[in-house]
Amino acid sequence: AKQINTVKEYKRNNSGEELSATMLNEESAIELIMMFTVPTDAERQMRLANTRFKTFLQETVDCIVKRRPKTFTLGGFSKTFDEYYVDNEGPEACLRFMMETSMTELMQKAER
């Protein structure tokens, strides 16, 4: 059986050729889809805010983690913070990465 090389190994072995980040092996044309479950939305935010994780996603599945301001108001006080997300539905949708807080949510999203 032929060994399947990782994305970085494949790019290194064929350095003169521009490849899709999801291509793992020229002969098999396997595409990578990442599906993660996290226990809470706070854990999702922690992972998506992590610079190394963002770089990893961009290099492996060509998905970009975006940031938007989100404001909460409680008792007359407002607090704005950054919310991190991967666009799974817009014109720049990333369909090769999913992160949800339950397996049920993940499977429902995978059916789309």
Image (cartoon, helix red, strand yellow):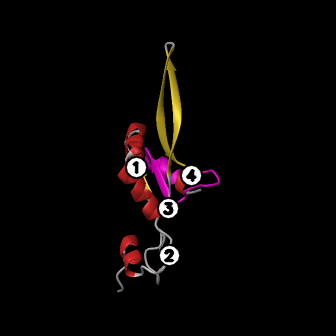
Q: Nearer the viewer, mark 1 or mark 4?
A: 4
Name the N-terminal-most of marks 3 and 4: 3
Q: Residues within 10 Å of mark 1 (few under 14, many from 20)?
A: some
Q: Tell me which segment is drawn in magenta.
A: 89-108
The three-letter code of the residue at mark 1 reads Thr
Q: Give the number of the disc on residue 88.
A: 4
Name the N-terminal-most of marks 4 and 2: 2
Give the Cα distance between marks 1 and 4: 16 Å
Give the Cα distance between marks 1 and 3: 20 Å
Name the N-terminal-most of marks 1 and 2: 2
Name the N-terminal-most of marks 1 and 3: 1
The quadrant of the image that shows the N terminus is bottom left
- Which residue has dot 2 on it? 18
Give the Cα distance between marks 3 and 4: 13 Å
Q: Position of residue 11 (x, y in %)?
A: 41, 75
93 is within the stretch colored magenta: yes
Give the Cα distance between marks 2 and 3: 14 Å
Give the Cα distance between marks 1 and 2: 32 Å
Q: Are marks 4 and 2 in contact (CB under 8 Å)?
A: no
- Which residue has dot 1 on it? 37
Name the N-terminal-most of marks 1 and 4: 1
Left or right, 72 with respect to 4, comes to: right
The three-letter code of the residue at mark 2 reads Glu
- Which residue has dot 3 on it? 62
Q: Position of residue 52 (x, y in %)?
A: 36, 53
* SS at mark 2 in the image: loop
* SS at mark 1 in the image: strand
Q: Reply above or below: 1 against 52.
A: below
The residue at 43%/46% (across/down) is: 102
